[in-house]
Image (spheres, rainbow, N blue to C red):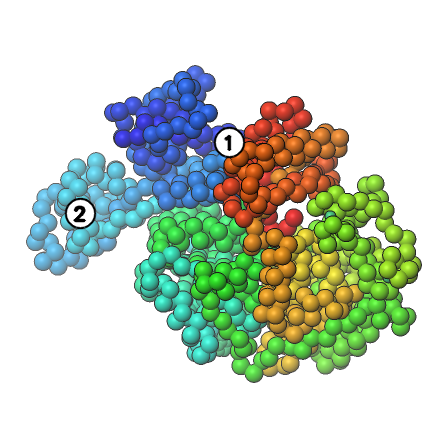
Amino acid sequence: MFRYAEVLVDVANRRLDQSFHYLVPEYLNLKIGMRVLVSLQNRKVQGLVVNLTNELREEMEGVNLKHVIEIVDEDSLVPSDLIELAHWLSQTTICSIAQSLHTVWPLLKGKVEAWIVLLASIEDSDVQTLQWLDSEAFRGLTVLNRARKKAISLKVFLKRANISVETLDKLLRHGLAKKEMRFIGTAQSSIEQVIKPEQNKKADSDKSQSGRTYELTKEQATAVKGVLAALEEGSPQTVLLHGVTGSGKTEVYRELISQVLAQGGDAILLVPEISLTSQVARSFESQFGEQVIILHSGLGQREKMKAWSDIVSGLKRIVIGARSAVFAPLPHLRLIILDEEHDGAYKQDENPKYHARDVARKRMDQRKGVVLLGSATPSLEAYAAGQTGKIRMLSMTTRIGTSVLPPVEIVDMRDELRQGNRSIFSLPLQQKLRERVDRGEQTMLFLNRRGYSTFVVCRECGYVVSCPNCDIALTYHTQGQAMRCHYCDYKELPPHTCPKCGSRYIRFFGQGTQRVEEEIQGLFPDVPILRLDYDTTRSSEAHHTILDSFRRQEASILVGTQMMAKGLDFPNVTLVGVIAADQTLNMPDFRARERTFQLLTQVAGRAGRSSKPGEVVIQTYSPRDSAVVRAANHDFQGFFWEEINYRKERKYPPFTHIIRVLLLHEKEDRVIKGANALGACLQQGMQEPEFGNTDLDILGPAPAVLSKLRNQWRWQISVKGTRQDLLRSFLHQGVQRFFKSPSSNGIILNIEVDPLST
Ligand code: ADP
Ligand code: ZN
Ligand code: ZN
């Protein structure tokens, strides 16, 4: 018996983002996940029990608590392992339990209920089975037989048939009926209404081949074996599959999922962006049929409810989706795969700011299952964990069939300028483009436009204006016309001439895909061109339309942003051009080099994926930067060791953790005052014995890269340290202190643990 219950009140209401504590009367047998009636501000309201404890937090001592009034419903609204997951989420990402519960279980208007389903009818059953049937059992079967769709909720069944639990057990044991968990929406009927005949998915060009399965290559078979071995151990495991682009990782996933299914398990396949994976998703659907469900953000509330119901009841056993699909409530979850695990899309930008990799890890810890991370360019964190033996590592080093990794040419854009070429396309790229157009082959051109920041580069010598303190590119802010370091707030005026070579060709970077498209159309007036970026793909249908059109070879050239780099497989693409590697390279972020390496490798991986050999051209002002050179040489290992040493030296992740606090306010002076006050509160914390002699390090306050967004000024403070728990409690105390100071009035705090970009 527990003394206190933590209750989320009025859970379906998103605005009420708070939990309250109540006393548990001795006569109530409360369980986590139950719905209860409590009083709040003299009203009786429903709430969900999210925690039971015998002790209260310090600040709650002495508060006059009320009693839980009664239990509304013995059934659990949310399965208890998912409530545990929500607690973990709110602790690790520093957000409220309500917020994380909404994330873990987005349908808080409904519940999970046990149902009984009739399996065999009395007429079909053989004599042996019938022998033991007594009148009570008969009554049960008759009730089931009459029920709609021969299924009925357990509670109603026991009441209506008036039979004992023992008899029910017998029915189940003899295979006459089965018990399953179902997710029931608030309006009982709504579930029925959303059951529509499966729409026939539009068949299109690649449908005919999509169901194919191959004889696995030796490398693939070894990888499959490795993961199966981990699964068999029955302890929580993470496996990293490092396979070069085109090595056939998807086939490995397919085989593993089919094996897991055969063993009675369920699986989740996560992809960075669902709209770009129709290819994979369709091929899984044609192999596994009805057992596959694809979760995407376009699902309406009712479709989602239906999806949840199908997943909870075991009808669907393979879930494919983006980040949030990691929460899919599969009852026998054994395997979670993250394809392209390095991708930033796995981190959620809003509260709770979770990383799907961490959630997957936590879920598989609960279930003693396996997380499989797949990538051609693993994140530094994952690869480092592999190197130190914390996780297992498997690798696939060759492309499928006769296909080889394409040769990559680095073009120095400073030379181009010297030769009088002011176009954004170098002469080598122009020439190779022309060859492709003549041969009827296809080209993809990448432009990475990320964030809103601008950096300043000398077109003559490639010099990038960067911070003398932080070794990170300075960011040009139109407001105030200054160059700023957003780590340490160093400032200087933008130069008119290059500080290094004196050239006047100073360039403020930040060109768009549209401009690239226009310029290329100028070079090749009659060639059909497609563009794929956030402007042309507002709707997810548009993605398919553009990509399908390109696949049908209706255009020779596809111009797009990094969203194209992800997992696309077009056999006729033999040339890939990167317009400016510098755009990622000079992001003011310690991960800039890692991102550049990943992006270039992934992008290059789109070329020459079938029998026709491919080629890649990378244009840059930093032709000797090792992220660029290593990517051009397909040298992941070399890059990894270099970068990991740099991170170690600089005390960046994975050697430390970072918590970033973003402060927002409409008035600039207020946000600056607030940031300074928070800075002071944190500094004060360093005086405490608990934190004094640790490696905690406060960075800032400084303006955020986006110093103003949606009319709010943004400043930030980061704290670094090797121990995450220490970091969290340090921040917690600092923030508490800050909220007591008048400078905190009206300031919005936005806290993020281990942000992907800083
Ligand atoms: P990756 O995800 O590692 O970049 P893919 O899974 O897209 O690679 O596979 C690359 C190509 O090889 C795809 O066209 C795929 O259909 C094909 N493929 C994969 N495995 C095999 C195999 N065992 N035999 C023949 N072709 C294969
Ligand atoms: Zn700096
Ligand atoms: Zn210069």
Q: Going from the N terminus, do you reach mark 2 or mark 1 first? A: 1
Q: In this view, does 512 lie to the left or right of 497?
A: left
684 relative to 433, above or below: above
Residue 310: x, y in percent? 39, 50
Residue displayed at 53% across by 61% down: 384
Which callout, 2 or 1, points to the residue nearer the camera? 1
Residue 348: x, y in percent? 56, 47
Q: Residues within 10 Å of mark 2 (few under 14, many from 20)?
A: some
Residue displayed at 77% across by 51% down: 468
- Return the residue nearer the eye: 407 or 715: 715
Tell me the number on the disc at residue 169: 2
Residue displayed at 69% across by 67% down: 626
- Return the residue nearer the eye: 461 or 668: 461
108 relative to 295, above or below: above
Q: Callout 1, which amino acid? A: Asp
Which quadrant, please, contains the N terminus?
top left
Q: In this view, does 535 lie to the left or right of 177?
A: right
Residue displayed at 55% across by 41% down: 693
Mark pair 2, 1: CA separation:
41 Å
Q: Which residue corresponds to mark 1?
A: 17
Judged from the image, the secondary structure of the residue bearing numbered disc 1 is loop
Tell me the number on the disc at residue 321: none
Based on the displayed image, in which of its 4 quarters is residue 78 positioned? top left
- Return the residue nearer the eye: 358 or 38: 358
